[in-house]
Amino acid sequence: MTRNIAIVVSYDGTPYCGWQVQPNGVTVAEKINGAIASLTGKRSKLYGSGRTDSGVHARAQVANFHTEFSAPAEKVVPGLNAFLPPDIRVLRAYDVDDDFNARFCAVSKTYEYVIQNSRVLSPFLVHRAYLVKYPLDTGLMNEAASVLTGVHDFTSFMASGSYVTDAVRDLSRLEVRREGDIITITASANGFLYNMVRILAGTLIYAGCGRLSCDDVKAILEKKDRSDGAPTVPPDGLYLKNVVYQGEYSYVV
């Protein structure tokens, strides 16, 4: 009997060419696919909640796969982890209805971008945070964030060459907090465009050092032209924090 299993996965994206299986490098999904085949004896198609790019991390990515594997869901976690490298860990597993799809059932996602605002990057944060050496004012960053929060056309915050028919997204949360020299940008939306979070982070960094005012940020948003925006920051500090599901699947987090 075929069943549908949802898994919550955490991973360090540093050594991988992103989530999605591709021919030019090892990916997170490829490793999980291999673990599923080793555990169940058959290959299954893995559906992720979304793609994370090369070098991007995840605290709680969600995926699902159909299988005839009969062991209880709680056995799937240690079973898959036994075949996965230590930088990819399955945290939880659930039996879900056959029509559950990790991508299409998701209602929102939250990303975090971590910055170390100091002269020297901690060796413990290499590939895990972006170093900004000049002082950043988180008050100015939050003022700029308030301009961007809400429902907007985010064409100016999408990588050039992206092909989407609709760049309107509901950015329900964009805020900045500091703890010592660590600044964390948190962004929640019903969907994100390609490189959108990294461009938002670059924009807030420019606002934080005084290179962009709130009026400048508003003008960039309204112009709908990527060429006039702030740079795209590196993937090192980017984490998929969690994926939100509602109704009968609200427990899948």
Image (cartoon, helix red, strand yellow):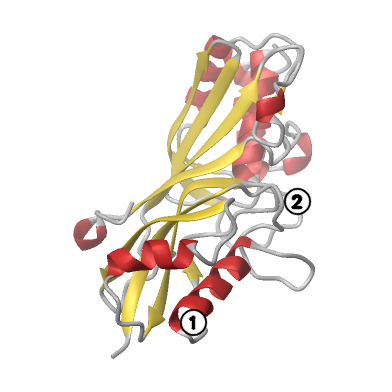
Q: Which mark is residue 160?
A: 2
Please identify the quarter of the rendering in which residue 239 is found: top right
Amino acid at dot 2 = Ser
- The residue at which mark 1 appears reads as 44
Question: Residue placed at 53% from the left, 49% from the top?
Answer: 192
Q: Nearer the viewer, residue 44 or 87?
A: 87
The vertical placement of 221 against 214, above or below, is below
| CA neighbours of label 2 inside 10 A, class few (<14), some (14 to 19), many (20+) | few
At 25% from the left and 54% from the top, the residue drawn is: 251
Residue 164 position in % (x across, y down): 62, 61
The answer to whether residue 155 shows anywhere in this view is: yes
Q: Earlier in the sequence, mark 1 or mark 2?
A: 1
Using residue 49 as the reference point, say whether residue 181 is left or right of it: right
Judged from the image, the secondary structure of the residue bearing numbered disc 1 is loop
Above or below, comparing residue 143 to residue 248 in the picture: above
Which is more toward the observer, 135 or 146?
A: 135
Along the line of sight, the residue nearer the viewer: 68 or 82: 82
Circles 1, 2 touching at the beta carbon (< 8 Å): no
Q: Tag 1: Cα neighbours inside 10 Å, few (<14), some, or many (≥20)? A: some
Closest to the observer, 14 or 165: 14
Q: CA distance from mark 1 to mark 2?
A: 34 Å
- 196, above or below 35, in the image: above
Mark 2 residue element: loop
Q: Residue at x 49, y 36 (%)?
A: 187
